[in-house]
Every structure is written in C-alpha cells, then in structure tokens.
Image (cartoon, rainbow, N blue to C red):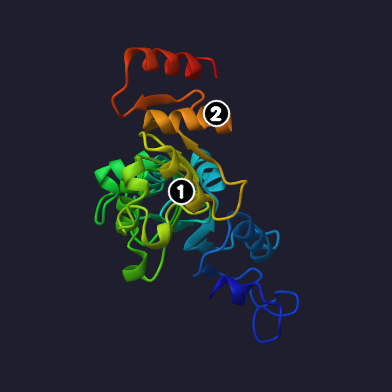
Amino acid sequence: DTYANLTSTTASKAGANSEYIKRKTVVVTTASTLQNIANLKTVVLDGQNNVSFTHNAIHDTRALITADVNAGGANVFDKTVTVSDAVTIAQGEALELSVTGGGNATGTLAYSKVTDSASNLADDAATNTGGTKAITGKTVVIDDATTLDQLHTIKTRVDASNQNSGSVTHTAVTDTYANLTDTDDAKAGSSSVNIVGKTVVVTTGARIAQLNALKTTVQNGDGNVSFTHNAVTDLRANLLAELNNNAGAMLAGKTNLVEDSISIANGESLETLVGNL
C-alpha cells in the first residue's frame, strides 16, 4: 500500500496501533524519506527480524541519498529515487550514476531542481532537450552573473511554457551596453524584464547619459539595486561636464574614451583630470 495509508492509524487503514501491518509482509508503493521508511520498517518488524519489508521509492535530499549510497545503498539501489532539493548538474549526474549503477542496476534517479552557474547551464550542450543532463521542465536557479545570451539559452532549454513545469531565476546580469538596451525577448526582453531589479554590470562603453538612462531602467526606483559600468565613451564636453558637475563619479576607475576629435593639449589636460580621480 501507499506510505500514507500504511502510516495512517485510523481503523480503516493501519489501525489505531498499526496492528494491521505489524509483523506482516509489507510493500510500500509510494515514496517517502529515508528516515520515514526506516521508522515504518521498525513499526512493521515489531522487534522481529524474519518479517519482509520492502519499499519501492525514496524521495529525499541529495546529501541523505548520497550518504545511503556510500553506506552500501541498501535503501536506494534498485529503487525509484527522486531528489527533493536543488543540485548542480555535476552533482545530479554523479548521483544518478551511483544510484542507477548500484545493486541490480534497475534503479532510477530524477531531480527537478537545479542550481548552477550560467556557463554550466548554458554552455554545456548536454543540458539541451534530450541530453543526458537535460534541464527541460526543471526549476533552475542561475547562481552567478549571466549574459543575456546565456539566459535565453537556459530559458529555451527549460521550455517552461511548453512543459507546463519549470522556471528560470537569475539575480545578476553582466553584458554589453548594446545587449542590455536591446528589448528583444532574447536579450533584455520586453520592458527590460530580464534586467530590471537585477545586479547589472555593463561591460562595454557608452555615453554618460545612456548609462544613466540604463541605470534608471535597471533600478526602477530602487536605489539599492546594484548597477556598475566598466567604461565610458563620450564627447570631451560631456566628460568635462561630468568632472565639473559630478566630481567625475561616472569616470573614476573606468576605461574612458573620448569619441570626438580633440587637441593634444586638451587630451593631456583631460587625462590628468581623470587620472586624479
């Protein structure tokens, strides 16, 4: 019977004192945790060692499943095993090899939650639909900064809308100014949905006004949202205005490029001012 029925102490199930299952041959048909199965086995055996107790499935954390594998796999080999918490792709693959290769090699392992880096989730072709590490329909969390191309690839592979399951969550984006301001679905998205409220790093230069506009979009009224740019490419007049009016805050520690023609003297003067920030 199911784990739920076998642990129900109503008169119509296992009985008030589990009398209908004690010292009986019992097969648990649905999954529960390793500890729950062990507790139920204790009830069924009722102090006897010659009572048959079998379970078909386990649903537990990666750490506890791994511990059972390392102890000989008595409770997970040749079972239908599902992982209850998030795993990296490498962890999921390693555990799957261990569970499916143990015992008589009739077991299976599945996991529905993946937390991993953008590069592992997007750049490894095996995570594509049908691959050995497929993330299709899974709940995916990207745990480091992603480019928008990587994000699109990961979302495509999860394919949540067609699978009716799964999602992709990210908190940080590092990309070029061009990509961050492209509202195509494969880039920043409609209304910049893929970057609003995220930690954003702009890797290529843009004008000060453009960067400020992008910052406004990203922060969306929340000044606590982190926005960083690595470079500024602007007219000399705008760079000077930034130095004079904003103490050069947008230029300090950045790679700065003057995009219009200037005299050598003007260039030297500007370089000195920026260098002193």
Tell me if mark 2 has few (under 14), some (14-19) or many (20+) residues whose alpha carbon lies within 10 angstroms of its own: few
Measuring from the top left, give residue 277's x and y in whole percent.
Answer: 55, 19
In this orientation, does residue 217 appear? Answer: yes
Q: Which residue is mark 2?
A: 244
The answer to which of 138 and 118 lies nearer the viewer is 118
Residue at (65% x, 72% y) in the render: 7
Measuring from the top left, give residue 34's x and y in whole percent.
Answer: 58, 55
Q: Is residue 191 above or below residue 213?
A: below
Numbered disc total = 2
In this orientation, does residue 97 appear? Answer: no
Q: Secondary structure at mark 1?
A: helix
Q: Is residue 123 above or below residue 222?
A: above
- Left/right placement of residue 275 relative to residue 102 reads right
Q: Is residue 199 above or below residue 233?
A: below
Measuring from the top left, give residue 212's x and y in whole percent.
Answer: 48, 44
Residue at (58% x, 28% y) in the render: 247
Under mark 1, the amino acid is Ala
The answer to which of 67 and 173 lies nearer the viewer is 173
Q: Of the residues tagged 2 and 1, which is closer to the observer?
A: 2
- Left/right placement of residue 53 relative to residue 207 reads right
The answer to which of 17 and 274 lies nearer the viewer is 274
- Left/right placement of residue 105 relative to residue 230 reads left
Tell me if mark 1 has few (under 14), some (14-19) or many (20+) residues whose alpha carbon lies within 10 angstroms of its own: few
Measuring from the top left, give residue 12's x and y in whole percent.
Answer: 66, 87
Under mark 2, the amino acid is Asn
Of mark 2 and mark 1, the one earlier in the sequence is 1
Q: Which residue is mark 1?
A: 213
In the picture, the disc for residue 162 is none
Q: Secondary structure at mark 2?
A: helix
User: Is the residue under label 1 in contact with that under label 2 (CB below 8 Å)?
Assistant: no
Residue lying furthest bottom: 12
Residue at (49% x, 23% y) in the render: 253
